[in-house]
Amino acid sequence: QVQLVESGGGLVQAGGSLRLSCTASGRTFSISALGWFRQAPGKEREFVAAIGWILGTTYYHDVVRGRFTISRDNAKNTMTLQMNSLGPEETAVYYCAATTRPVYSGNINSSRLYDYWGQGAQVTVSS
């Protein structure tokens, strides 16, 4: 089992920045990738970014590429998402997720790949 706890988030004005963190515990040696998803009210959960746990290969949704940066610290079992130039449409609950399955570019953005989820962190961007 892997446990995930998010921190960060909050309220920011449009154009501002926020940082989210995710700390993993439990069988962290089995993790192959960590990802961030978000879900706005009335909408489906959406892939944001992911990172390979061993090599650190990064993946981004096109709408956040260039504005968001995902990183990880294996020694501390943490992952962060630096979010810049946020827009009101990005108001959502952001979830940290982990998978122990084989990952590749074709499946990394699918929520079905991830077996473990955090409780979510609210991000609100005011206009």
Image (cartoon, rainbow, N blue to C red):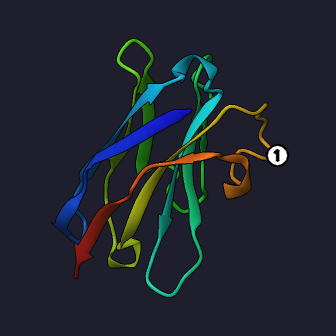
Question: Where residue 81 sits: x, y (%)?
Answer: 38, 43
Q: Look at the picture and state if 46 lies above or below 62.
A: below
Q: Residue at x 57, y 69 (%)?
A: 45
Q: Is residue 30 left or right of residue 68?
A: right
Disc 1 packing (10 Å; few <14; some 14–19; many ≥20):
few
Q: Secondary structure at mark 1?
A: loop
Question: Where residue 78 sits: x, y (%)?
Answer: 38, 28
Q: Residue at x 39, y 56 (%)?
A: 119
Q: How many marks on residues?
A: 1
Question: Where residue 66 sits: x, y (%)?
Answer: 47, 48
Question: Where residue 12 sits: x, y (%)?
Answer: 18, 66
Q: Quadrant of residue 74?
A: top left
Q: Residue pushed farthest front?
A: 1
Q: Residue at x 59, y 76 (%)?
A: 44
Q: Residue pushed farthest bottom?
A: 42
Q: Look at the picture and state if 36 lies above or below 126.
A: above
Give the residue number, with chain letter if any, for mark 1: 106
Q: Is residue 104 left or right of residue 57?
A: right
Comparing 6 with 91, the one in front is 6
Q: Amino acid at mark 1?
A: Gly
Q: Quadrant of residue 62?
A: bottom right
The quadrant the C terminus occupies is bottom left
The quadrant the N terminus occupies is top right
Q: Residue at x 54, y 22 (%)?
A: 27
